[in-house]
């Protein structure tokens, strides 16, 4: 099969060796994104090359932003004026093209180049107190729709305070008929110089395995964290450098192991479970200029109820090194949510805590109850029966009895009323003229 690709800002020409022009087109683009198509056939119908010409534009193009603001020495450290701040961002488009069947992108780089979307990424940082812009930078990236793009900005912040970090993505590609900017903002605090000694305890992540467990299923709770005591050193202190050498002030950190204490809370409307323990030392003393990877501590947990749990980890340290430093930049608290599934043995869509018979799919809170001696809808009673509670008593007149038939009480026996007179002496032997309605017809005596 032969294929060539030529394009200007909007038009793409593809030569196929197939008769199925429409199917060939749809292997490249999801139908939602096709603006106009037209096809012309040249040569014979059977097996000859065909030329497909189409104009394709996309509505509401968006490059979604994810970004973090972190210390270049490690995301676990606070932002300080003597360390560089990194704004690490990634972008991905909202476009969902189908995978090509006839023309793999790797074989046709022109096509892949055509499917890139030119995007302007802007970073602005403002001093919250003065609303003054203290940093501005902008770059243009050419982003293939199926590959997330990454952009890193370096911010040499020179004074402490509170700052608003704003990132904007704007697609400027002519293949977009309309564009929606994505604007994301984070609030950060910049501290003075990093102390010579500092205690760091940071909870970085909480993940669950399985990610959506069933009730009573043992679940791994994976806690990602950093906890250690660090000494700040300058490169010139341990290497033969002159103090006027700019490299003299390059910061290196020595990581000293400490223990960490944690409390984890599993919060559900029906229960609150709190557990506490101590984590062992995670680091050995070393001098590096990059942060070690965080440690993963795996805890086990068995949820007792279906629904949403808020899981909160709080980490502190009673290690003797931390109080000695007098500095603590810890962010040891983190919360994540997990949805626990109920056990549904009969597959009727109702978990066992609300399904009164989880072995029968016809019995559940959504079923229709009938008077059959079974609580079909799990409301505690057998609905649509004359009565439901054995021994319950009611006046016969409330059951419609009139005359002598309305006298006395009925009693519930096996979901039915018993005890009211259905006949009387009058009904068996005729009406008697004594002002009593013996035949229970609601009519006066026949005298």
Image (tube, helix red, strand yellow):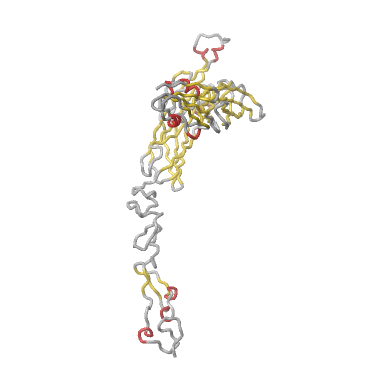
User: Which residue is at the front of the view, 115 or 242?
Assistant: 115
Q: Which of 332 and 72 is in front in this view?
A: 72
Residue positioned 61% across, 28% down in the render: 163
Q: Quadrant of the N terminus?
A: top left
Query: Which residue in the rendered view is the most extreme toward the left?
Result: 359
Please state which of residues 1 and 328 is positioned toward the viewer in this rendering: 1
Q: Is residue 207 above or below residue 105?
A: below
- Residue 215 appears left or right of 52: left
Q: Is residue 180 above or below residue 359?
A: above
Q: Is residue 196 left or right of residue 361?
A: right
Foreground: 389 or 304? 389
The percent coordinates of residue 212 (x first, y second) are 40, 40
Number of marks in the rendered image: 0
Give the image location of residue 264, x and y in percent: 44, 38
| Residue 172, image x, y percentages | 58, 26
Q: Is residue 223 visible?
A: yes
Find residue 374 and report its image quarter.
bottom left
Residue placed furthest toward the front: 44
Quarter of the picture containing the C terminus is: bottom left
Place residue 17 in its image quadrant: top left
Task: Please say whether residue 184 is visible from this viewpoint.
Answer: no
On screen, residue 413 above or below 234? below
List x then y, in percent, for residue 154: 56, 21
């Amino acid at each position: 099969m032969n294929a060539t690709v030529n394009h200007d800002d909007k038009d793409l020409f593809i030569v196929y060796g197939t008769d199925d022009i429409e199917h060939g087109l749809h292997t490249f683009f999801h139908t939602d994104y096709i603006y106009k198509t037209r096809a012309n056939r040249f040569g014979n119908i059977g097996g000859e090359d065909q030329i497909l010409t189409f104009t394709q534009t996309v509505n509401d193009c968006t490059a979604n932003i994810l970004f973090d603001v972190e210390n270049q020495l490690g995301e676990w450290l606070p932002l300080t004026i003597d360390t560089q701040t990194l704004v690490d961002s990634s972008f991905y488009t909202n476009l969902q093209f189908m995978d090509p069947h006839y023309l793999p992108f790797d074989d046709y780089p022109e096509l892949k180049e055509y499917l890139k979307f030119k995007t302007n990424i802007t970073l602005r940082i403002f001093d919250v107190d003065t609303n003054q812009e203290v940093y501005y930078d902008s770059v243009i990236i050419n982003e293939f729709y199926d590959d997330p793009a990454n952009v890193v900005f370096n911010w040499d912040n020179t004074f402490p305070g509170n700052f608003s970090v704003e990132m904007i993505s704007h697609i400027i590609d002519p293949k977009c008929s309309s564009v929606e900017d994505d604007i994301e903002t984070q609030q950060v605090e910049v501290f003075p110089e990093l102390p010579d000694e500092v205690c760091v305890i940071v909870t970085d992540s909480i993940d669950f395995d399985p990610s959506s467990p069933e009730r009573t299923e043992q679940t791994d709770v994976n806690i990602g964290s950093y906890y250690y005591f660090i000494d700040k050193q300058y490169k010139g202190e341990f290497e033969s450098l002159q103090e006027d050498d700019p490299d003299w002030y390059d910061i290196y950190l020595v990581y000293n192991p400490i223990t960490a204490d944690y409390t984890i809370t599993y919060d559900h409307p029906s229960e609150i479970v709190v557990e506490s323990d101590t984590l062992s030392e995670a680091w050995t003393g070393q001098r590096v200029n990059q942060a070690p990877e965080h440690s993963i501590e795996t805890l086990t947990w068995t949820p007792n109820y279906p629904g949403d749990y808020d899981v909160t980890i709080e980490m502190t340290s009673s290690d003797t090194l931390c109080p000695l430093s007098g500095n603590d930049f810890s962010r040891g608290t983190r919360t994540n949510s997990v949805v626990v599934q109920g056990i549904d043995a009969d597959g009727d869509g109702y978990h066992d805590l609300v399904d009164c018979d989880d072995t029968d799919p016809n019995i559940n809170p959504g079923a229709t109850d009938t008077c059959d001696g079974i609580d079909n809808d799990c409301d505690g009673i057998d609905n649509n029966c004359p009565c439901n509670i054995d021994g319950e008593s009611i006046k016969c007149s409330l059951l419609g009895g009139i005359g002598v038939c309305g006298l006395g009480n009925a009693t519930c026996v096996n979901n039915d009323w018993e005890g009211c007179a259905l006949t009387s002496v009058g009904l068996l032997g005729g009406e008697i003229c004594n002002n009593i309605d013996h035949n229970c017809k609601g009519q006066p005596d026949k005298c």
